[in-house]
Image (cartoon, rainbow, N blue to C red):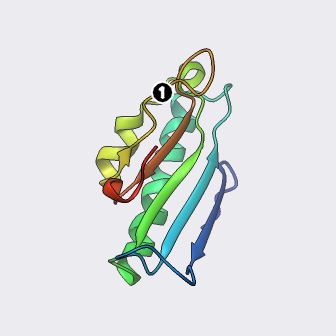
Amino acid sequence: MEHEEVESIWVQLRPHSPPQNISIIFLGVVYHSTTNGEVENATLRDHIQRNIDKYLLKHPNVTVILTGDFNPTSNGLHSDSISRTNHLKQLVQFNTRVSGILDWFFTNRPHTFDL
């Protein structure tokens, strides 16, 4: 699940005492640089979609969490370009830095989390 042009880590978690309806968590953490542009944005979107699609084929009931520092105010990345294609909801609705919402938290089970 690696891509040489994308800074990310992907982990499968199996909590010992999971919340209701969660047996596996597929966690992706991303750092997307302020210097990236549309080419790198497209590479990141493709990388995320490929990894989530591949994992969901084997584990269709998994809870997906995608989070990290996406720096959208600098690189022009839009959260809906990630959420729509991957059926995720971005839950952070408050500024995480002075310049805006740079740190996103996506999930396919928004009702499970309270941010």
x and y percent of residue 36 in the render? Answer: 63, 29
Q: Is residue 89 above or below residue 103?
A: below
The residue lying toward the viewer, choosing from 96 and 55, is: 96
Location of residue 20 (image quadrant)? bottom left
- Kind of element beneath mark 1: loop
Q: Residue at x 49, y 71 (%)?
A: 25
Q: Which residue is mark 1?
A: 94
Quadrant the N terminus occupies: bottom right
The spot of residue 40 in percent (x, y) is 57, 37
In the figure, is residue 67 to the left or right of 60? right
Q: Nearer the viewer, residue 24 or 40?
A: 24
Amino acid type for the residue under numbered disc 1: Phe
Query: What residue do we see at 41% from left, 75% from top?
Result: 22
Residue 2 falls in image quadrant: bottom right
- Kindly indicate the quadrant of the structure image that contains residue 91: top left
- 17 is higher (above) or lower (below) than 38: below
